[in-house]
Image (cartoon, coloured by chain):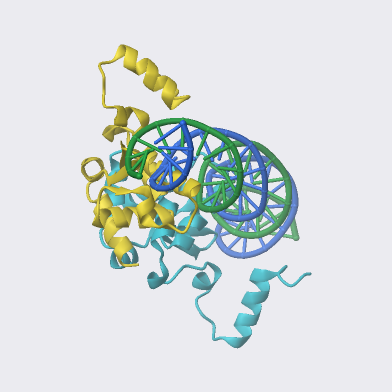
Chain colours: A cyan, B yellow, C blue, D green
DNA sequence: AGACTAGTACGACGTTCATCGAACGATACC
DNA sequence: GGTATCGTTCGATGAACGTCGTACTAGTCT
């Protein structure tokens, strides 16, 4: 019944015993590999106005913290949207002290789906 | 302008009294005007694998009937997907006898969001 | 007229989604 | 050690979604 209760901590703890000390930042947040980015997931991630806004903002200025967007939603909703973008492979997050820095995975997306991100950004800029 | 479309038939009936006789095909099925196509709606419409498949197939051969796609879903689900695509402005449907012919709104989409459709199709072709 | 065909309308169902608030965790600073 | 600050996790909730089956409409064909 309690097999999955402590997920993150337990996994991280056992991993530390078995594997060499990897970068903690990357371990904590899981991103899909470039090859594993799925078109439907990317399109779904971009189909929400709030997330489109986040991506458009990141295209202008990269490496911004989650809070710096001043989104009209609560923190938990914010977490949700950034996770959807991250798990779809649209953004990369890494921990920097007490904040998370977000950046667009431009190269990965361009390699996998050439021109897609640019045309979406161009389209988004036309309001 | 009428703001809220309640029943297609009622609207079509009143419209026929006021306006000159338009093409019946176009009246029955409502499509958004090119300027009214919304990016989020298009991306959402394309974010479903079934609909992506429909669009990819239409890109290869236009003006196909709904039934000709042999989708692994029932007719009513089929109707649903084609309606989502139509209402998002991705496809245009017009009645031809007892069937509905579907075609991509390539020009409208290219005008509104240049390059978007092509990059999505290119991305979709990479499986 | 009757049968067939192509698709729609409607209601139901289980799932996913966007959102919230409250409680928690981790880091930085006094 | 206290206390902000930044963000996550955990339900909960209401809306939207994808799917289905049944009943229906509108043409077509014999």
Point 28% across, 15% down: residue: B19
Point 27% across, 61% down: residue: B122
Point 36% across, 55% down: residue: B69
Residue occupying the far top of the picture: B18
Q: Quadrant of the C terminus of chain A?
A: top left
Residue occupying the far right of the picture: A1
Would you place residue A86 above or below residue A19 in this image?
above
Q: Position of residue B32 (x, y in %)?
A: 33, 33
Q: Position of residue A122 (x, y in %)?
A: 26, 47
Would you place residue A63 above or below residue A54 in this image?
below
Q: Is residue A72 visible?
A: yes
D7 or B63, nearer to the observer: B63
D27 or A123, nearer to the observer: D27
- Left/right placement of residue A11 relative to residue B51 reads right
Q: Quadrant of residue A73?
A: top right
Q: How many marks?
A: 0
Q: Quadrant of the N terminus of chain A?
A: bottom right
Q: Is residue A117 visible?
A: no
Q: Position of residue C30 (x, y in %)?
A: 61, 53
Q: Position of residue A6 (x, y in %)?
A: 71, 69
D29 or B1, nearer to the observer: D29
Point 23% across, 46% down: residue: B106
């Amino acid at each position: 019944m309690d097999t999955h209760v402590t997920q993150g901590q337990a996994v991280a703890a056992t991993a530390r015993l078995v594997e060499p000390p990897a970068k903690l930042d990357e371990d904590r947040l899981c991103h899909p590999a470039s090859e594993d980015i799925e078109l439907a997931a990317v399109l779904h991630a971009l189909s929400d106005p709030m997330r489109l806004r986040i991506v458009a903002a990141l295209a202008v200025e990269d490496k911004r913290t989650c809070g710096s967007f001043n989104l009209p939603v609560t923190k938990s909703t914010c977490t949700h949207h950034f996770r959807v973008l991250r798990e779809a492979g649209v953004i990369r997050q890494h921990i920097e002290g007490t904040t998370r820095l977000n950046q667009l995975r431009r190269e990965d997306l361009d390699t996998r789906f050439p021109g897609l991100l640019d045309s979406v950004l161009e389209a988004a800029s036309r309001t």
